[in-house]
Amino acid sequence: MRRTRQSSSNTSTIISLPPPTHCYRILMRIPIQNVTPECGHAEVCGWVHEVRDLGGLAFMLIRDRTGIIQVTIPKKKVPEAVLAAVKAVSRESVVRVAGPVKAIDKAPGGRELVPESIEIISLAETPLPLDVSEKVLAEMDTRLDSRFLDVRRPRVAAVFEIRSAAIHAINQYFHDNGFTNITTPKIVAAATEGGTELFPIAYFDKEAFLNQSPQLYKQMMMSAGCEKVYEIGPIFRAEEHNTTKHLNEATSIDIEVSFADHLEVMRILEDLIVKTYAYVNTTCSVQLANLEINEFILPKAPFPRLPYADAIEIAKKKIEEPIKYGDDISPAAERAIGAEMGGHYFIVDWPSEIRPYYAMQYEDDPSICKAFDMMHPRMELSSGAQREHRYDRLVQQISKKGLNPESFDFYLRPFRYGMPPHAGWGLGADRLVMTMLGLSNVREAVLFPRDMHRLVP
RNA sequence: GCCCAGGUAGUGUAGUGGCCUAUCAUGAUUGCCUGUCACGCAAUCGACUCGGAUUCGAAUUCCGACCUGGGCGCCA
């Protein structure tokens, strides 16, 4: 502590910090992983992980996000106030403990803190809604009800630290490659594509919806001349699905690139996946260890390009249910094909009739289009396409789908004033984290998941 | 939306008509214990989702509601 105080006073001399008030205390606090016998003296703040009272000797484990330290209380040698605090404190209370740090082989981590003072900053109620120390595991529903306690568990925190690292790597990748980060509205007037249900919301005297995808806006930015854009943001789908891989609010990583075709944006996608895994691998070893992931398998580019027609053939051979060319790929088929492929792969050359109107058809065979899905063996992670940028063709394709081009006026307008050819994709961030870490439920990868049954917290 | 399986102390569970005054673990409370590390020991506390029905008797069977998990559909 002496050392820390000195350095902070030096710092304030140099850069003239305002007189320390409560910040002074924060500067004195040492992250638990940095507490070593060389500190001499330390002040740690954290949560009471456990108390073990042996009679004349008590142990208290203090946890912060960096680790756990043992506080050892020889009852005859510590101040009266410390004894009172040890007696009064409950598990998961927030405390500040200060005292000398000693090297002791029999203590966890080889060091322990003997308190001169223990301050109970925030006393936790008992009993706890779930067991943070993981002696008894809680079910997903219980955990989500008390997510603030759930995330105190290192293995849960690890998921979100890795998610953060992955998102960082993705932002970095786009930044390094000249993409413009955009933010598009989530409150919109109408659907951008058919199919999925929208959440209606009250918007003053108008009808509005939560956006299901930034698709239209990304494409508008192509017309706007931004050439390479990306967005990481929420998307909303009002589907009444009830599965381990669907949410009503998800995070989508979206890109759109001008003068690129589907093949080019596929290369970007696989490169991004490979680099994101690599970044997590090199920066999150502690978190991966917390998750007991001993072998973090790094995907290798290029991912195989599997034509849709071949994917259907594989599924036909491997699963019972009838499946034919032109069908959507069912979850069972998805798993069967995934098992065959063994790693990330693309499904390409989709029948035009089962892809949205905006996918560009092949010139030599309009029955298939330049759309793709990027798959993990367990599920779909991304879907994208080269878009149809020619106004007349686009109108034609909208009509062919049985839709009325007039109701797409807002969408079509940018195509009338100089639209470059372009391609893009959307990648599910939650599913990316889920499959990366082998989580069984997408809810594990989302702090506060929104599904049909859950709106709180 | 459909199908299946469930709902028992704070948490996770056992219990398929009477042996339930409900099992076990964890937890909480109190006491003992100077090297614990899932500390140990002792005592205590704490639960059958709700409503209706069948039955001499229901945690257990039936009906309805609500809630949860999984699969499918839809979707990404």
Image (cartoon, coloured by chain):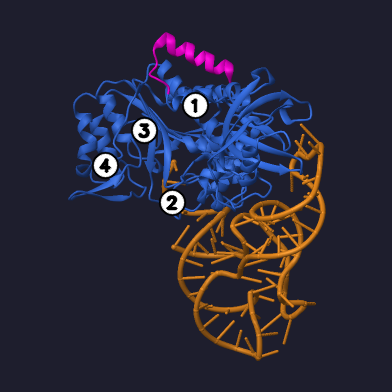
Chain colours: A blue, B orange
The crowding category of the residue bearing disc 2, from other C-alpha atoms within 10 Å (few below 14, some 14 to 19, many at least 20), is: few
| Type of the residue with mark 4 | Val
Q: Secondary structure at mark 3?
A: loop
Chain ID of residue with mark 2: A
Q: Which residue is mark 2?
A: A456
- Residue A361 circle label: 3
Q: Which residue is mark 1?
A: A25
- Residue A185 horizontal/vertical position (percent): 29, 36
Choose top left, top right, bottom left or bottom right for residue A343: top right
Which of labels 4 and 3 is toward the front? 4
Q: In this orientation, does residue A44 appear?
A: yes
Chain ID of residue with mark 4: A
How much space separates mark 1 and mark 3, taking CA atoms?
A: 64 Å
- Residue A269 horizontal/vertical position (percent): 47, 26
- Residue A375 horizontal/vertical position (percent): 53, 35
Residue A203 vs residue A16, the one in the foreground: A16
The crowding category of the residue bearing disc 3, from other C-alpha atoms within 10 Å (few below 14, some 14 to 19, many at least 20), is: many
How much space separates mark 2 and mark 3, taking CA atoms?
A: 44 Å
Q: Which residues are magenta?
A: A1-20
